[in-house]
Image (spheres, rainbow, N blue to C red):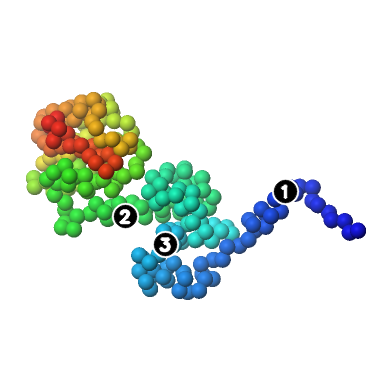
Amino acid sequence: MRKIQVRANSGPGNEMEQKTEDMITPKVKDWPENERPRERLVRYGAESLSDAQLLAIILRTGSGRRGVLSLAMTLLETFKELRNIDAASISELASLKGLGTAKIAQIKAAFELGKRLMSESSGGKPVFSSGHALYSYFAPRFKSLKKEFFISVLLDTKNRLIRESKVSEGTLTNSLIHPREAFREAIKESAASVIFVHNHPSGDPAPSRDDIAVTERLRVAGEIIGIQVLDHIILGDGRYVSLKEKGVL
């Protein structure tokens, strides 16, 4: 009877796992031309592509023996939804085999462009005349953020956006938000007024005691330096609170 030799370092399933890892996923350039994501996008439009195909275009190349579409599908399978990929931290994305710094940067840049497009005004510089206008403009940008971000929105005499400036990042406290930092860019830009915006990652926009205390402190500081605080908007999940409408301002 012929003896079958088994390598000492092999174990149940090891050989099959090794063969699986060694299988080379066909590269996109080897696909039929009409099946390649980029070519399909050009010919049929971006809307004809699946989420995985769009991600594959963003990622551009695979990693090692893994093809780019396989990598894109693994990304979707891991995070389940596009919003979860957007919300994932750099370290969370880096934990996925095949995603290096360059690919993570490409993913983050693509999602950020999408948010900025959603918040763009079609009529030039946006005019903020209500809390809802602020919410509509900034909500897409703040969606899924896991930290609190506090920004100042600098406006001209007609309430048109000059630009926005990040004041702080992290849990909002009265001691964290200093008027000097909050109004620094507004003074530089000679803004006529400001609106402050921050998010509650919990999804509940109800103002805390610190939110109200910070707002009152900034209102007083604005009066002293001659820059009116028009509102303080707190963004939640699908809703917002205007402290002006609440009577705090």
Q: Amino acid at mark 1?
A: Pro
Residue 50, numbered circle: 3
Residue at the right extreme of this rendering: 1
Q: Quadrant of the C terminus?
A: top left
Taking the spot 50% from the left edge, 74% from the top edge, the residue there is 32
Q: Badge 1: how crowded within 10 Å, few (<14), some, or many (20+)?
A: few
Q: Nearer the viewer, residue 103 or 48?
A: 48
Q: Amino acid at mark 3?
A: Ser
Q: Amino acid at mark 2?
A: Gly
Q: Nearer the viewer, residue 29 or 152?
A: 29
Taking the spot 38% from the left edge, 73% from the top edge, the residue there is 43
Taking the spot 32% from the left edge, 31% from the top edge, the residue there is 171
Badge nearest the viewer, 2 or 1: 1
Quadrant in the picture for residue 134: top left
Image location of residue 210, percent across then percent down: 25, 26
Q: Quadrant of the N terminus?
A: bottom right
Quadrant in the picture for residue 190: top left
Which residue is denoted by mark 1 in the rendering?
12
Residue at the front extreme of this rendering: 1
Q: Determine whether the residue tagged by mark 3 lies in a helix, strand or loop.
A: loop
Q: Is residue 89 visible?
A: yes
Q: Determine whether the residue tagged by mark 2 lies in a helix, strand or loop.
A: helix
Which residue is denoted by mark 2 in the rendering?
114
Badge nearest the viewer, 2 or 3: 3
Q: Determine whether the residue tagged by mark 1 lies in a helix, strand or loop.
A: loop
Marked residue nearer the N-terminal end (2 or 3)? 3
Marked residue nearer the N-terminal end (2 or 1)? 1
Distance CA(mark 1)–CA(mark 3): 37 Å
